[in-house]
Amino acid sequence: MFKIPRGTRDFSPKEMEKRRYIEESMRSTFKTFGYREIQTPTFETLELFTAKSGEAIIDEIYHFRDKGGRNLALRPELTAPVIRFYVDKLQMEPKPLKLFYFGNCFRYDRPQKGRYREFKQAGCELIGTDTPIAYAELIAMAYTILEKVGLNNMRLNIGNLSILSSMFDVLKLPKEKQKYLISLIDKSQFEEVLSALEDFGIKKEDADVFLGTLRTSDINKISNYIKDDKKSKDELSNLKKILDLLETSFNVNNYKLKMSIVRGLDYYKGIVFEIEAPALGAEKQLCGGGAYELISMFGGRESSTAGFAIGFDRTIVALESEEYLFSKPKIDVYVIPVNEDMTSKALEIVQKLRNQNISTDIDLLKRGIGKSIKYASSIDAEKVIIIGPDELEQDSMTIRDMKSGEQKLVNINDYPPSSKKF
Ligand code: AMP
């Protein structure tokens, strides 16, 4: 017996039905916001990911040397591949460029519910604009995608790394100390932030005010705390515009300002946001994104970039926890020829139905009508067509409605009726 690799999953027809439904719903929302789909390879050069995230990422990903001696890695995320693609081939495209994608990602994570070694992301990148309306639209799209798949319980948190940096400036903390604090803030270890601040020689009351500002969602308190320089002021006024647009134009009111969102990565800057499903506990984060800078690092001409990634698998776990009623895989018609002589007529009908995009299956095992009907019920067939010699003599066949059990005789030439409902 072979075992499935740790952290990976097989998907049954029932699970694939859910996954396809969610993918189609997400794709359709991306498109309604004017985004266009792209695809990049499953593996990339290892260097692409170390350039973006540093050498430490090597421990967290699947990498290998191919037969030509190239160092490659299964992608752990899609932003770096998409920006590589952009720098390579899309820089001349008219701006803004709105790109979306679905792709499997691979991380050497410790598996648990909602955390896998192979998982799927739905994401997008917005290139060439940094206006408040662009960011408000991006955040609203992430929220709408999850809302449209049917999720009810979500929390949207919005932060801003430039404003967080202005908050550090108030304490006059050097960059390496900020970095250390950021790693604690990322893990929501606020007690540790407090004691680290005191270790760095910050007075207790100043550290308390800093922490209070970090944890407040009152924009005025944040505004009063940070320095009154032009950069901070501009950033704050843009953040206000984004929040205002979200509420008034995009109808997204269910958000919280959260300055402690740091996204754990160095290349983010400015606006950042996360969407979580509180019911999911430890692995509750469904979506993360924000504005970032990568293009110049990858050798391109700098242009504003922002994007987000939604955890596809976690979205399903969240929907399941809300007891969302997914549709099951089903088939429109199941055809049963009652004996060998009926096979060619049965196949003729099957062909006719399939040509009209009616999903149709036929008994391939030559079993009795009773067993065939049982099988048809197990694959959720809506109708069963029984082709027998007596009926055929009158150019007819029996149609059974599987829900009601009702049967009727129908002329073969009148079937299927012009509408798909029959
Ligand atoms: P990240 O690229 O780390 O910001 O992840 C974006 C989203 O992908 C997260 O919000 C999660 O929903 C999802 N995600 C990240 N890592 C995993 C994993 N190991 N298994 C399943 N989903 C994941």
Image (cartoon, rainbow, N blue to C red):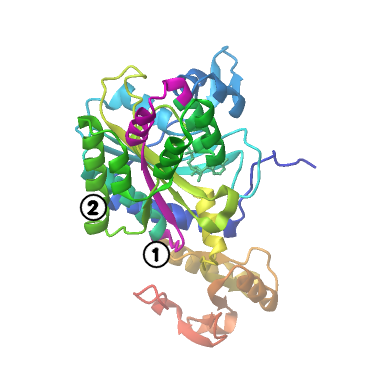
Looking at the image, is mark 2 or mark 1 nearer the viewer? Answer: 2
Residue 354 at what x, y percent from top left? Answer: 45, 62
* Secondary structure category for the residue under label 2: helix
Q: Secondary structure at mark 1?
A: loop
Image quarter (top left, top right, bottom left or bottom right) of the N terminus: top right
Please state if 357 lies on the left or on the right of 365 as rendered: left
Q: What residue is pinned by disc 2?
A: 244
Say left or right for 292 vs 275. Answer: left
Q: Which residues are magenta?
A: 148-177
Tally of numbered tags: 2
Q: Amino acid at mark 2?
A: Asp
- Towards the viewer: 184 or 348: 184
Distance, label 2 to label 1, CA atoms, is: 49 Å
Q: Nearer the viewer, residue 207 or 243?
A: 207
Q: Is residue 108 above or below residue 51?
A: below
In the image, residue 408 sits, relative to residue 218, either above or below, namely below
